[in-house]
Image: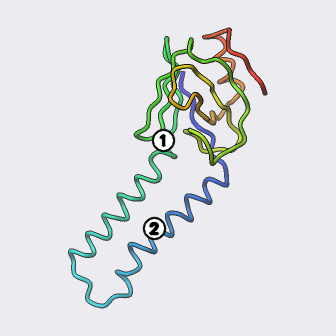
Amino acid sequence: MIFRSKMDRTVKIFLTIVIFILAGVTLVPILFVPKVPLEAIIILSMTFLCSAILILWPVLHIKYIFYEDYLLIIGGPFRNKITYEDITRIEDSHDLWTGYRILSSKNGIEIFYKSGFWGSIKISPDNKQKFINELLKRNKLIKTRQ
């Protein structure tokens, strides 16, 4: 079973602002500097394109996949594999900016687990209750606080 991440308006606005700033820094000089060499245009355009991909990929390609023995959390190049037995509790989370997170919404959950370096991860499945129910089916010992 695969769940996608919910995306808040705040995140969309933030990403738009970041991309516009990035475009301003890398592409606007091409428009205002006379006689820009072709090499400079290519380098600046590629810098913008690569930077935009590195910023957008982890946010726009978030999914949470239930496998038989573990939950796989994917956010662009970042991956977390959490076995169901390691999950100790689930809590509501409304914090978008702190902690270890692979999410794009303030209205998410925090999964606490034994095997992680940080001890927890914040995620934002699009159907939060269905996601939690699926986790509880796979490990009935998980404590929830919502």
Q: How many C-alpha atoms fall within 10 Å of the one at disc 1: few (<14), some, or many (≥20)? A: some
Q: Amino acid at mark 1?
A: His
Q: Quadrant of the N terminus?
A: top right
- The residue lying at 53 percent from left, 29 percent from top is 64
Sequence-wise, the earlier of marks 2 and 1 is 2
**Could you tell me residue 44's position as x and y percent?**
31, 71
Q: Left or right? Give the position of 128 relative to 72.
A: right
Q: Position of residue 60 (x, y in %)?
A: 51, 46
Q: Which mark is residue 141?
A: none
Quarter location, residue 17: bottom right
Label 2 is placed on what type of residue?
Answer: Leu
Q: Up-down: is 144 above or below 101?
A: above
Q: In the rendered image, which residue does mark 2 sit on?
A: 22
Q: x, y percentage for residue 66?
A: 53, 20
Q: Residues within 10 Å of mark 2 (few under 14, many from 20)?
A: some
Residue drawn 43% across and 37% down? 78
Residue toward you, 35 or 112: 112
In whole angstroms, how far apart are the C-alphas of marks 2 and 1? 20 Å
Q: Residue furthest top?
A: 140
Outermost residue toward the right in this view: 146
| Numbered mark located on residue 61 in the image | 1
The answer to whether residue 28 is left or right of residue 116 is left
